[in-house]
Amino acid sequence: MGTRPELLPVVLVLVPVLLVSLFVGVALGPTVVPLEDTVRYLGAALTGGELAPDEMTGYSIVWRVRSPRVLLAAVVGAGLSVVGVAVQALVRNPLADPFILGVSSGASVGASAVASLGLFAGLGVYALSTASFLTALGASALVYLAARTSAGLTPLRLVLVGVALAYAFQALMSLIVFFSPFGETARSVLFWLMGSLGGATWGALPPATAVVVLAVLVLRRSGSRLDVLSLGDETAASLGVEATALRRNLFLLTALTTGVLVAVSGAVGFVGLVMPHLARLLVGPGHRRVLTVAPLAGAILLVWVDLLSRTLFAPRELPLGVATALLGVPVFVVLLRRSGYLFGGH
């Protein structure tokens, strides 16, 4: 077996790549802002510097439109990657992703209700995110209650209940759209389901960032227990890890984090499934190592995917889920074929 790179060199590469990616993502787009102007506009925004009146258009593009969007892309990419690691440990399944437990399907019910029925109309631009977040949490609660038994939560039962209820939520969403009196409802809901950061604002950043940071800290602190959990419940019990309690806490944390991320970006697929495997390819199967690399790699990926989605067919915007698949799947397949990778690093 070949040796894996050490963690520190990988991190020292990914961090500057992420910083450069953030800057490039702010500078580039359908309207290209010269790099020196981008630096000046960002400096003026951060320090309160003055700009000429004819520079306000460029300033608005850089600071008010692109900066929150690019930063939110990084936060969502990092969050989905971390949740992907947690869910794969939760259900011990390499095909698991943040949406396997029905969270995104539940959120789609709220999104379709806003588009079709005007739910939470009084909240204005926050109506969609609020409704999708609440229904995502409601879906998570239903999955938890249906999957729980006297013996606790089992991986297979969680997956089966999550998939079954996801179909039910999708059917309910389709029913709402089918009877909608508005012709554009199906198009808007479909675009949201495939993911979009077009509505990113500075107000969406603090809650999303706080939840993702909390998830990273909690999961990294539980890294050794996640390693034990991946060996099976009997082995975990023999090593002093209560699998049932740990699985319940993981479920609650992943449901909350996924609900927040879906509320601000829609259902962005692929990232949470593949970034954990990419991190294992780079630094091995240890969860603390994976939870250090995965959020950095996920943030870089989604920043570039978002840039691609808003520039490739400008002025039209490509849904993020489509762009993640087009960009990421071929790269990941090549990595797997070249590395002889198996789930868990064996």
Image (cartoon, helix red, strand yellow):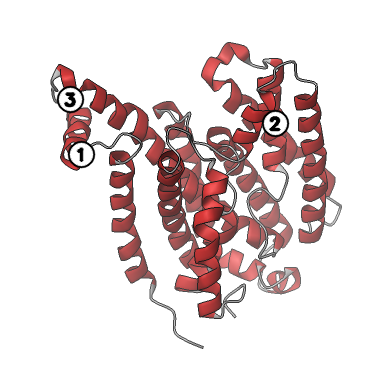
Q: How far is mark 2 from mark 3, CA to CA?
A: 40 Å
Closer to the camera in the image, 115 or 289: 115
Q: Residue at x 77, y 48 (%)?
A: 162
Q: Residue at x 33, y 27 (%)?
A: 64
Q: Position of residue 51 (x, y in %)?
A: 14, 23
Q: Nearer the viewer, residue 101 or 235?
A: 101
Q: Residues within 10 Å of mark 2 (few under 14, many from 20)?
A: many
Kindly state the secondary structure of the residue where label 1 is placed.
loop
Q: Amino acid at mark 3?
A: Gly
SS at circle 2: helix
Kindly check if marks 1 and 3 are in contact, taking CB atoms under 8 A apart as contact: no
Residue lying furthest bottom: 1
Q: Amino acid at mark 1?
A: Pro
Please tell me which residue is depicted at 61% across the width and 46% down the height of the picture. 253
Q: Is residue 202 above or below residue 279?
A: above
User: What SS does tag 3 mark?
Assistant: loop
Q: Nearer the viewer, mark 1 or mark 2?
A: 1
Q: Residue furthest top?
A: 122
Q: Earlier in the sequence, mark 1 or mark 2?
A: 1
The residue beneath circle 2 is 135
Q: Are marks 2 and 3 in contact (CB under 8 Å)?
A: no
**Residue 279 visible in the snapshot:** yes
Which residue in the structure is indicated by mark 1? 34
CA gap between label 1 and label 3 equals: 20 Å
Numbered tag placed on residue 48 in the rendering: 3
Q: Position of residue 244 (x, y in %)?
A: 73, 57
Q: Quadrant of the C terminus?
A: bottom right
In this view of the protein, can residue 222 be seen by the observer? no
